[in-house]
Amino acid sequence: MTKTQFTPLTPPASTVTATPPADPAAALAHFAARLSFEADVSDVHADLEARAPGLVVVDSRGTEAWDQGHLPGAVHLPTAEIAARAADVVPAGAVVVTYCWGPGCNGATRAALAFARLGIPVKEMIGGYEYWVREGFAVRTADGVERRPVDELTAPRGAISCGC
């Protein structure tokens, strides 16, 4: 009986490059595709402030969540109602941006899927309501407009965006 020779694995010089990066053409396609599906809260805020034409921001949460606070300028359209009400809420040719609670919730993804099924151009706001609030942007509640201090882990103090 012969013993199998054991060769210890040599750890890679870099954990990051242990799996090689994609070639630049594949990376270009991947990152361009991600940006065609997603928008961040800072960009959505800038567009709402600028009143960018043809943009409809949709809060896909339920009524209790909407009443607790929502983006000023957003439209309330819970996911379960999108198929029935989208035509009344979204003008022809508009781009929809969906949001829900935050990164731990895929409600905005389900809402975006519902709009895509209707043939409506759509993006998902990554970070959702949570990151909107954490970045210090105003929210509308039953008591009016409120704003929390910026969470310095999500945005620089006193700036509108991270500057990236």
Image (tube, rainbow, N blue to C red):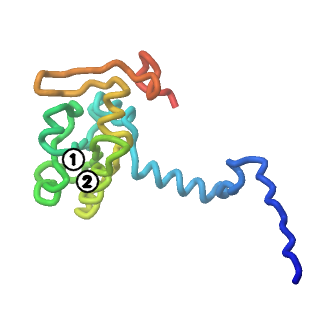
Tally the numbered discs: 2
| Relative to 69, residue 124 above or below | below
Specify the quadrant of the image occupied by residue 50: top left
Check residue 50 in the rendering and tell me which mark sits there, or answer none. none
| Relative to 67, residue 32 above or below | below
Q: Which residue is mark 2?
A: 111
Check residue 60 in the rendering and tell me which mark sits there, or answer none. 1
Q: Amino acid at mark 2?
A: Ala
Q: Nearer the viewer, residue 12 or 9?
A: 9
Q: What residue appears at the point 71 percent right and 54 percent down from the top-left corner? A: 18
Q: Nearer the viewer, residue 7 or 49?
A: 7
Is 39 on the left or on the right of 62, as rendered?
A: right
Label 2–label 1 contact, CB within 8 A: yes
Q: Secondary structure at mark 1?
A: loop
Location of residue 81 in the rendering, given as x and y in whole percent from the top left corner: 13, 55
Location of residue 54 in the rendering, given as x and y in whole percent from the top left corner: 26, 43
Q: Secondary structure at mark 2?
A: helix
Location of residue 16 in the rendering, given as x and y in whole percent from the top left corner: 68, 48
Is 158 on the left or on the right of 57, as rendered?
A: right
Q: Amino acid at mark 1?
A: Ser
